[in-house]
Amino acid sequence: MTNSNTKTKTIEKEKVVAETLNGRFAMIGLIAAVGAYLTTGQIIPGFV
């Protein structure tokens, strides 16, 4: 019994690129937040 009704999903290249960039920018933001905390002791420097 084979299922001849299977559909293959194709992922658009633009979505893959967008998600990759989103992940990379999120990692940059996380490293920037850790760096700001290590240097100033505040998550958002200057914000009380």
Image (cartoon, rainbow, N blue to C red):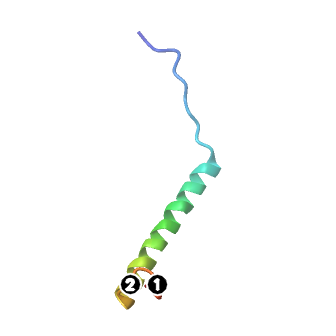
Circles 1 and 2, Cβ within 8 Å, touching? The answer is yes
Q: Could you tell whether 4 is left or right of 43 in the image?
A: right
Secondary structure at badge 1 equals: loop
Nearest the viewer among 29 and 3 is 29
The residue lying furthest to the front in this view is 48
Three-letter amino acid code at the position of disc 1: Phe
* Picture quadrant of residue 42: bottom left
Q: Residues within 10 Å of mark 2 (few under 14, many from 20)?
A: some
Mark with earlier residue (1, 2) = 2
Q: Which residue is mark 1?
A: 47
Q: Residue at x 38, y 90 (%)?
A: 39
Where residue 19 appears, as percent x and y from the top left, is 55, 55
Q: Position of residue 15 (x, y in %)?
A: 60, 49
Q: Position of residue 41 (x, y in %)?
A: 35, 87
Residue denoted by label 2? 42
Which amino acid does the dot numbered 2 rest on?
Gln
The residue positioned 56% from the left and 62% from the top of the image is: 21
Q: 12 left or right of 39?
A: right
Q: From this view, report whether residue 33 is shown above or below residue 19.
A: below
Observer-side mark, 1 or 2, equals: 1
